[in-house]
Amino acid sequence: KIRLQRENARQELVTVAEHCGVPLAPEDQLAQDLHHWRNATTEEIRVEQQGLEKWRELDTLLEGLTLQEFQAKVQQHRENALLLSSPFSSAELSEARSNIEQYEAQIPELAAHADWGAQELAYVQGQIRSYAEHPVSVSDAEEELRIAEEKLANIRMLDDTLETTHLFLSQAHDSVHRDIAPFLAEVVRHWLPEITLGRYVDARVDSPTLRVQVCDQSGEWRDAARLSHGTADQIYLLLRLAMVEYLTKPSEVCPLILDDITLQSDTRRKERILNMLRKVSEQRQVILFTQEEEVLQWAKKNLSQPEARIIELMPVAYAMAASISG
């Protein structure tokens, strides 16, 4: 088997040598000749590729010109350069050559300024032509000036009004935040240990941003927005309760209307939220809409009339069907 593989390899070596034009020789010499042939061919390809790249570069420089035309163009550029550099000394030219990259980098900006200047010049020239073709009397010009000054005065008055309004609104905004932040913190702090089962025991609200932070049993303060989804929902529920109390006049009682607030909570959180709402209902009416069977069963077990009332709503599809059949 090994002899057969060796014979096959030798035959393939001979075939490759014939294809590459390498004279036949003993196996070892033939392998070495093929190795030299590969290296020589690779070098020839590299040289040809370099020549091709140089040819492409030359073709780019020529820009479609013949060699004689290109030489004439180069001579013209050389003469122009000598003519332009004649007013300058050798030292000045040497300094300019050392900063040529910096000057070239400034060309786009200078070109943009030149374009802008050309546009301004065209505009002014157009204005001059317009005034030359349609001259305006002194009285008309004075009237236009008076109207323009009145408009300017109105605009300045409006600007002053807007600035003053913005100042008042900013002060009112800051004042409301300063007033409401302690109130929100107090309400959240009151219910927080109960609704989180003692995991968080304190709360504070930043006046400028109304950002809520809560403190755990170890004394570490955490942003409410970075807590778990369920805990954050509990805190935002307390903030809604605080807003109801803050916005309601002392002589009035505003109902608290909630919709599916326990949808993202597990069973234990649901029970704590519902127990808290039952206590809140002792001070104000609480209306809770829910689609959860678990909440309905809790209500049937823990609520009783006349303090509470459970109303089971008919699904929309059934209600529509009943309405149509009726």
Image (cartoon, rainbow, N blue to C red):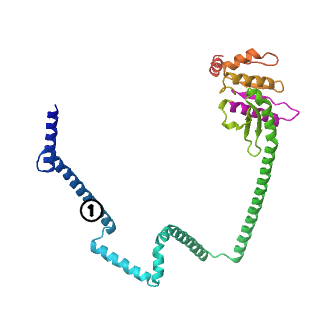
Q: What's the amino acid at mark 1?
A: Gly
In the image, is residue 171 above or below residue 4? below
Q: Quadrant of residue 298?
A: top right
Q: Does residue 4 lie above or below 24 as drawn?
A: above
Residue 247 visible, this orientation: no
Say if 307 sits above or below 246 in the image: above
State left or right for residue 13 relative to residue 163: left
Q: Secondary structure at mark 1?
A: helix
- The reply to whether the magenta stretch includes residue 92 is no
Q: Which residue is mark 1?
A: 51
Image: magenta residue range? 231-260
Q: Position of residue 216 (x, y in %)?
A: 73, 33
Which quadrant of the figure has residue 90?
A: bottom left
Q: Residue 109, image x and y in percent?
A: 52, 67
Question: Of residues 216 and 291, which is closer to you in this image?
Answer: 216
Q: Is residue 315 visible?
A: yes
Residue lying furthest right: 251
Residue at 75% x, 63% y is: 156
Q: Position of residue 243 (x, y in %)?
A: 78, 36
Q: Give how far across and how far down residue 165 sits, in percent.
A: 78, 54
